[in-house]
Image (cartoon, helix red, strand yellow):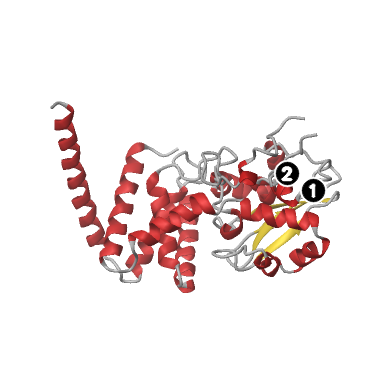
Amino acid sequence: MTGPSVSTDPLLTGDAAGPEAPPRRNGELVFEAPWEARAFGLALAMAQDDADGWEAFRGRLIEEIAAWERAHPDGAEDWSYYERWLNALERLVVERGLLSPERIEERMREIAVHQEHEHDHEHEHDHA
Amino acid sequence: MTTDSQTAYAALRTKAIESLLIEAGIITTGAVDDICRAYEEDIGPLRGARVVARAWCDEDFKRRLLDDATAAMAELGVGGFAAERVVAVENTDAVHNAVVCTLCSCYPWGVLGLPPTWYKTPEYRARMVREPRAVLAEFGVQLPDDVEIRVWDSSSDVRYMVLPMRPRGAEGLSEEQLAGLVTRDSMIGTGLPIAPER
């Protein structure tokens, strides 16, 4: 009979940190990019000890997904679950008055400039 | 698929929001790190697999699980975030259960870890309700015509997990070995447990 050997299954050896660890076990990447994991962790961190906050986030996530589906009735190819997630998170922090959209835009520009500098710096080193 | 510029923009936006929330003292970097690590490494479907294996070995536990899954799982220390109210549905020779969330992606994270990518796609969420038999066949689960398929729609109030049937030929395996046969997909209903080696 084929299939994974029972004795070496990572679920049994308890080697949960290995490369075959679950949730990736069925050959599926949980996150397609690092920012998705951060966006995921951000929403959960905000929701810790705050059930209302979680419900508020979840309600916005449902709206964001539904709005995307209405705008893309044929299921366009650029579907990204975590972009909807991020939209919901941004709306939550803005609508709760925690951050302003202008402040977020400004910080994005600051980080972009900073990353540009770092990139130039690395570039110089490449040629040193 | 998303484009590179879409991804770069989202990454930038995530960073901006994270750094501002940290500055404002609303969250800490450590809290986000801990959560990401826990869900990527610690909370896999292993917890759910332990629950299923116990139910296969212990009829009384199985009855408690089907009666009140949240309480029964708490006996094993399984639960936590997004697992406040879990309902376990049992597969039999006559009934095969499968789980979907038609609204978004409700999923018992505390039991099964992070939902797989396909669970969150509009396609799965729509088709699993409309044509479950065809979708299951695409996952490699071919069911006889006389097996009834029940599709359960998870919500924020109730999250479902499937109690799959114990595979034939698994007699004599320990509870721990049995847990190794329980795949994530078998607890969503889009897969079956691994057949034991003979």
**Residue type at mark 2?**
Pro
Residue A109, image x and y in percent? Answer: 20, 51
Q: Residues within 10 Å of mark 2 (few under 14, many from 20)?
A: many
Q: Is residue B141 left or right of residue A33?
A: right
Nearer-N-terminus badge (2/1): 1
Mark number, residue B193:
2
Tags 2 and 1 touching, CB below 8 Å: yes
The C terminus of chain B - image quarter: top right
- Name the residue located 58 percent from the left edge and 41 percent from the top edge: A25
- Name the residue located 79 percent from the left edge and 54 percent from the top edge: B56
Whether residue A83 can be seen here: no
Residue B179, image x and y in percent? Answer: 70, 49
Report, in whole angstroms, how far the alpha carbon at label 2 lies from the one at label 1: 7 Å
B9 or A117, nearer to the observer: A117
Chain letter behind tag 1: B
Q: Residues within 10 Å of mark 1 (few under 14, many from 20)?
A: many
Query: Can you tell which quarter of the image residue B19 is in?
Result: bottom left
- Name the residue located 72 percent from the left edge and 69 percent from the top edge: B68
Residue B96, image x and y in percent? Answer: 78, 50
Whether residue A17 can be seen here: yes
Residue where numbered disc 1 is placed: B166
**Residue type at mark 1?**
Arg
Q: Is residue A109 left or right of residue A42?
A: left
